[in-house]
Amino acid sequence: MQTRFLALLLVLPALIMIVLFFIVPLFASILGAFEVGDSFGLGNFSKSFDLYSRDMIFTVVIVSISTALIGILSIAIGGYLTLGENPRSVAILRWLYRWPMFIPFIVVGQVLRTFLAKNGLMNNILVSLGILTPLQTTGFLDWRGIVIAFVWKQTPFVTLLVAGAMASLDRSTIEAARNLGASRLRILIEIVVPQVSGTLLVGLILSFVTMMSVLSVPLMINAQSPTMLTADIAFRINAHGDYGVANALGVISLLLTAGVALIYLRQTMKDRL
Amino acid sequence: MTAHIDLWWLPRAFILGLLAFIIFGPLTNLLLWTVAEKWYFPHMLPLEYGFTFWQRVFSPRGNAMASLMTSIVVATLTVIASLVLAIPAGYALSRLKLPFRGLILLAFLIPQAFPNLPVYVNIARFFYEIGLNGTIAGVVMVHVTHGLVYAVWIATAAFSAVDIDLEEAARSIGAGPLRAFRDVTLPLAAPGLMASAIFVFLESLDEFTGSYFVGAPVVNTLPLLLYTAGSGGNYQIASITALLLLVPSIGFMLVVERFLRADVLSKVGH
């Protein structure tokens, strides 16, 4: 009994930090969303929907497209790392894919802003190679830029998890299917992916939540309308000091994420308990 | 058979080359911007190269040095505070009987599992009332809360990976619990704790959203400087700042496996 008390005492300071500086402000934001003047109501929400319903759809579409692309690419890269038969290209790919993982989002925003702009390096190269004429170039600094930034940054993280799970699979079923003449693509889709789907799901959900809360990428790549809810929240605070609508937008993005987070919690609880 | 395989090098090389372009193209672009004196459309490469902007960034009057110092001070304080909180918590979570252990571990994930922007907005409002807004202490608190999941989870894994028999051996030859912890368990867990310290340091160094609401414009960390320089159209300064943030991150990626051994890694989150 005494050790239990001691153990709780040792964990308590760290837990207090989380409660005080995350959970309490989280509840404050939910409460603040319903605060209209001195009373409570849904005024902030109706205002949010009037002003920002386009941005809500925009946010969900962008994050969903990014999540889908990240899933497809991480399966493709992880699959090649596991089933690839050319040791040299497997080694090159293993060395190559991780680079963007630890690059901060703010740096990703700056790097891609200069690279993808109408007169950025990408278009300059295409023009000098004769693939495009200067008049045909278009900038990618709109929804496509945000999707590219998200996929560029998050794919290595999910791939790392997925490739790790694939590497620890039992090779015998793969070898057996191979001996029976199944193609590698079929082995990947029918044997490998179903066995790593739990890990894939966890990686994708963590990425989904991350993308829902990144402020720097939308601010730097696409600050004009339509933009993501995070940029709208920052705008409401900085330009209007309007905490009511900012909190309502926060609650809406929480609700959009909550469904996804619920799946995640269920998954980890299942693994843990 | 060989003829059939030989043909495959072409698409393989093409895809790997494309991937290398997608990953290193933007990074090369960043490097070019840091040394571009003059660069405009439609020239593929800068017209003049030089280090004028580096001089400007690193001049004593330049605000980049001040931002770099602020960032390092904030990150160091964040690491110290996180470890002070995470070492006892990690020890308790790995060694002692703890009710609701799984739930407590999950609680540290909460700051990563919810969109944190609305939280920062309300912390900033609260800090403003108690005078913590725009102070180093305020920014450190926000960074600690966000980085605690790495600190606690990796510390827990690091202590779990230390053989409990060694600790019991020390106890049986007369060492007290604190002595056994200090002389046996702590040194053996040190590489894992080091890894968690680096994780927390990088998280703090790179953190933008929290610093933007709680710190700006008084506590001007490197990410905030990058953002202001970039939105002011000063791509050279922004790119040099981005490079300063990039180097520690990539350096860590290259050495992470040395600190985070497989026996610790396999215990993270358990």
Image: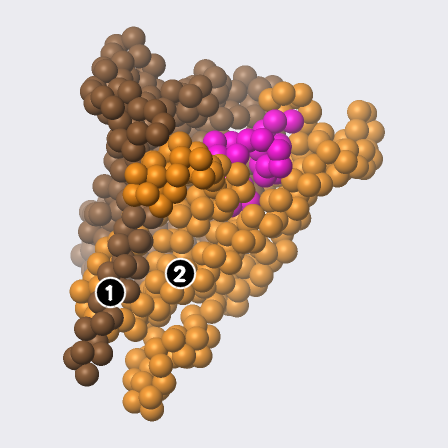
Q: Is residue B167 above or below residue A120?
A: below
Q: Position of residue B81 (x, y in %)?
A: 38, 33
Q: Report the span colored magenta.
A: A210-236
Q: Of residues B183 and A68, which is closer to you in this image? A: A68
The residue pinned by badge 1 equals: B10
Magenta stretch secondary structure, dominant: helix
Q: Of residues A245 and B40, which is closer to you in this image? A: B40
Tag 2: residue type? Answer: Ser
Q: Which chain is orange?
A: A
Residues packed near mark 1 inside 10 Å, few (<14), some (14 to 19) or many (20 plus): few
Residues packed near mark 2 inside 10 Å, few (<14), some (14 to 19) or many (20 plus): many
The residue pinned by badge 2 equals: A74
User: Is residue B128 rendered to the left or right of residue A48?
Assistant: left
Q: Position of residue B59 (x, y in %)?
A: 25, 12
Q: Position of residue A120 (x, y in %)?
A: 38, 34
- Give a yes or no on whether discs 1 and 2 share a subunit: no
Q: Which chain is brown?
A: B
Circle 1 chain: B
Circle 2 chain: A
Residue located at (46% from left, 23% from top): B231
Q: Of residues A37 and A210, which is closer to you in this image? A: A210
User: Quarter of the image holding residue B252?
Assistant: top left
Residue located at (63% from left, 56% from top): A259
Q: CA distance from mark 1 to mark 2?
A: 22 Å
Residue located at (35% from left, 51% from top): B154
Tag 1: residue type? Answer: Leu
